[in-house]
Amino acid sequence: MVDDRLLWLGTMSGLAKYDRELAGLVDIGESLSPHSIKSICVKDDSLWLGTTSGLLQVSRADGSLIEE
């Protein structure tokens, strides 16, 4: 999933993002482990993730889980 400068990647162990400005991959799977990401939808300032365990909402700013 691509936004301004980031490529969001769903993996078997969580979520990762590639930052074109930093030219590096940042693994943010720790906060989402053990969720295997199957789909990603961008909505405003959030990412909605379809996982093997259900639907999750995370912040696009830092990848933190949004719990409501």
Image (cartoon, rainbow, N blue to C red):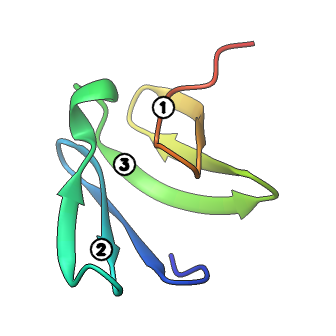
Mark 3 or mark 1: name the one nearer the start of the chain. Answer: 3
For label 1, count other residues whose C-alpha is less than 10 Å away and answer few (under 14), some (14-19) or many (20+): some
Real-space Cα separation, disc 3 to disc 1, in angstroms: 15 Å
Which image quarter: residue 38? bottom left
Real-space Cα separation, disc 2 to disc 3, in angstroms: 16 Å
Q: Residue placed at 82% from the left, 57% from the top?
A: 44
Asked if marks 2 and 3 touch (Cβ < 8 Å), the reply is: no
In the rendered view, tell whether residue 57 sits above or below residue 65: below
Disc nearest the viewer among 3 and 1: 1
Q: Nearer the viewer, residue 18 or 12?
A: 18
Helix, strand or loop under label 1: loop
Residue at the extreme front: 22
Name the spot of residue 53 as percent of width and height, x first: 42, 26
Amino acid under label 1?
A: Ser
In the rendered view, tell whether residue 10 sits above or below residue 53: below
* Residue designated by label 3: 37
Which image quarter: residue 57? top right
Disc nearest the viewer among 2 and 3: 2
Name the spot of residue 5 as percent of width and height, x first: 50, 83
* Residue designated by label 2: 18
Name the spot of residue 36 as percent of width and height, x first: 29, 41
* Residue designated by label 1: 64
